[in-house]
Structure formats: structure tokens, C-alpha cells
């Protein structure tokens, strides 16, 4: 990590990666200084701007170096704070956290010249290359190995939340112990029944097997899998297949699609099998059905089980 500047801005909607980057920064500064560096989190609600500036311009009584993480500040507030940047103590590191940063705005222009900028956004469900790389790297951090195919299985069962995946990998690393290798069997052994059932449900829909889909839905609901999670898993796969189907109908080659979507070939081939079983119009209809079902469940106009069963029928029946 580059430590040539004392001001950092980590922005985007993937909070887990931002927190991980702060930990990396903390470890690097601690290693460089030979002592543990403290992190002090400062929000706009915790103190006025004048006190924030005083904090950044002063030495800590308990640590020769310190990281101050500024969160929940507006762009205007940050501009006021950064006006005093030349008075910031050079042993204080400032990390600004933003969910969004307008590249056309004055804050971005200022930060691009005085700070180290890094963007961290959630991976789209079809960006399986990135998700796979995250799983492989995280497993390595925990001192274990996992092959790409098993990494994909973990993603299919646990979803693409990086925080959830990291927790699952930590559990798996403890489970495999001295064996130091995570296998498909390990992943299935630790997965709760609801996760396996929703995994089976999505695959049943992908294979257009309505009987298996109803059975898997029943298992998932009996295992107390939240209906909105089930909807989300189905939506994720349908949307990915719709995207691939749309690109295929534009005569874009398989290699170009894989590269464009940052998708691993194993998952892409699974999606190819699915898109051969549904038309483009059926995928569009499926998205509408899922959105309608989401509203019905939220409004309690139908029981989750009935709403989901009707949705499966509408998605998978041939008209």
C-alpha cells in the first residue's frame, strides 16, 4: 500500500472491503513504525468540524501515530475540514469514508490531488471471476487452500456477500484444521439445510424442473430460510441469465461475453445450459414476476409460501 500521502479516501458501497483496506493500512503503518497504531473513528454527529480540525492538527497523548477515520460527513463539511490540511500533523493519517463520490465535483478534484483514492464497490452477481479471486485470497489469509471449482460452490451456496463469504471461509478453515484444504464435501457439511435447499432451488429453476423446485422450496421454508433471501437468490440467477441471453442474441461471442462480464467459464457454461431452456421474453417475465412477488410478500397480501409457489409456476410453466 502506498504511504506517500497521509490522506486517504476509500469510497463505494462495499463496506467489507473498505474495512479490510483500513486494517491493511493499520498493519502497514504499525509495521513501518514498529508500534501498534490506534484507529479513532470520527463521525459528523460525534463532534463539530472545528474540533475535528483540532484533532487532526494535534498529537495523540497515547500514540505517536494515529489513523483518524472520518465517516458520515457531507462533501461540504469535508471541504471545510480539508481547507486546514496543511496544518494536519504529519504523524496523523486521515481516512475519509464515502459511499459515493462525484467525479465531477470539487471534492473529488481536491482529493485526487492531495489523497490516495480507492473505490470499493460490491461485485455484481455475474462477476464470478472477482468473487472467486476474493474467496481464494481470503482462504489464503486464513492459511488454507481452496480450488476454483469449490470456491464457486461456496459462492453458489452462501451467496455473493463478501462479509458472509469471509465468515464462511473462517469457519471452514477451522473445520479443516491441519488438512489445510477446503473441499466440496467440507462446504456441504458446514452449510445449513436452508442454504443447501435454496441452492438446490435455484438449480432446479435453472434446469426448468418444477417438481424439484417445489420440493426444494418446501425444504428451504421448513429450514426457516427467509423468503426475501430466497427471492434474492432466484433474482440473482435470472438476471444473470437474462443478461447473457441478451448478449447472445446480439451475436456476441462466448469469449467476449465471459471477458465483458468477468465471469468464470464454469459458471458461464451453467448459465448457457439455462438460457437454452428459456426464451428472452420468459426471462423478462420472470423478473416481473419476482418483483411482483416481493411486493406481495411485503404487503402481506399473500403468505410467503403461496406467493413463492405461484411465482415458481409462473416462471417455469410453458405457455
Image: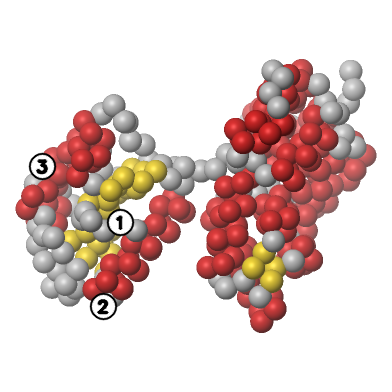
Residue positioned 43% across, 45% down in the render: 120
Closer to viewer: mark 1 or mark 3: 1
As drawn, the residue found furthest toward the right would be 211
Image quarter of the C terminus? top right
Image quarter in which the N terminus is found: bottom left
Task: Point out which mark residue 2 bears.
Answer: 1
Task: State left or right for residue 170 relative to residue 311.
Answer: left
Residue 114 placed where, x, y %? 19, 45
* Residue matched to label 2: 34
User: Image point 78% across, 58% down: which residue?
Assistant: 193
Residue pictured at 15% horizontal, 48% vertical: 48
Q: Nearer the viewer, residue 308 or 166?
A: 166
Between circles 3 and 2, the one closer to the viewer is 2
- What secondary structure is found at the residue carrying circle 3? loop
For residue 232, say whether it is visible: no
Q: Residue at x 83, y 26 (%)?
A: 278
Amino acid at each position: 500500500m502506498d504511504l506517500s500521502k497521509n490522506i486517504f479516501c476509500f469510497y463505494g458501497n462495499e463496506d467489507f472491503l473498505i474495512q479490510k483496506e483500513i486494517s491493511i493500512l493499520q498493519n502497514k503503518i504499525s509495521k513501518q513504525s514498529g508500534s501498534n497504531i490506534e484507529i479513532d473513528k470520527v463521525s459528523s454527529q460525534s463532534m463539530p468540524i472545528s474540533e475535528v480540525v483540532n484533532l487532526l492538527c494535534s498529537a495523540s497523548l497515547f500514540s505517536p501515530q494515529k489513523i483518524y477515520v472520518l465517516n458520515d460527513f457531507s462533501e461540504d463539511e469535508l471541504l471545510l475540514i480539508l481547507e486546514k490540511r496543511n496544518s494536519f500533523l504529519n504523524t496523523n493519517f486521515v481516512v475519509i469514508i464515502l459511499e459515493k463520490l462525484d467525479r465531477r465535483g470539487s471534492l473529488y478534484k481536491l482529493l485526487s490531488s492531495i489523497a490516495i483514492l480507492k473505490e470499493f464497490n460490491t461485485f455484481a452477481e455475474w462477476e464470478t471471476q472477482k468473487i472467486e479471486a476474493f474467496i481464494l485470497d481470503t482462504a489464503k489469509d486464513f492459511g488454507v487452500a481452496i480450488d476454483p471449482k469449490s470456491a464457486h460452490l461456496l459462492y453458489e451456496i452462501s451467496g455473493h456477500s463478501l462479509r458472509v463469504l469471509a465468515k464462511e471461509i473462517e469457519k471452514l478453515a477451522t473445520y479443516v484444521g491441519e488438512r489445510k484444504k477446503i473441499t466440496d464435501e467440507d462446504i456441504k457439511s458446514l452449510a445449513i439445510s436452508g442454504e443447501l435447499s435454496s441452492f438446490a432451488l435455484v438449480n432446479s429453476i435453472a434446469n426448468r424442473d418444477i417438481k424439484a423446485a417445489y420440493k426444494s422450496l418446501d425444504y428451504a421454508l421448513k429450514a426457516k430460510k427467509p423468503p426475501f433471501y430466497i427471492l434474492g437468490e432466484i433474482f440473482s440467477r435470472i438476471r444473470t441469465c437474462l443478461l447473457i441471453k441478451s448478449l447472445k442474441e446480439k451475436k456476441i461471442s462466448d469469449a467476449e461475453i465471459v471477458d465483458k462480464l468477468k465471469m468464470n467459464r464454469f459458471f458461464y457454461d451453467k448459465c448457457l445450459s439455462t438460457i437454452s431452456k428459456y426464451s428472452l421474453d420468459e426471462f423478462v417475465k420472470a423478473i416481473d414476476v419476482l418483483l411482483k412477488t416481493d411486493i406481495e410478500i411485503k404487503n402481506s397480501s399473500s403468505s410467503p409460501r403461496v406467493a413463492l409457489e405461484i411465482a415458481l409456476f409462473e416462471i417455469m410453466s410453458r405457455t
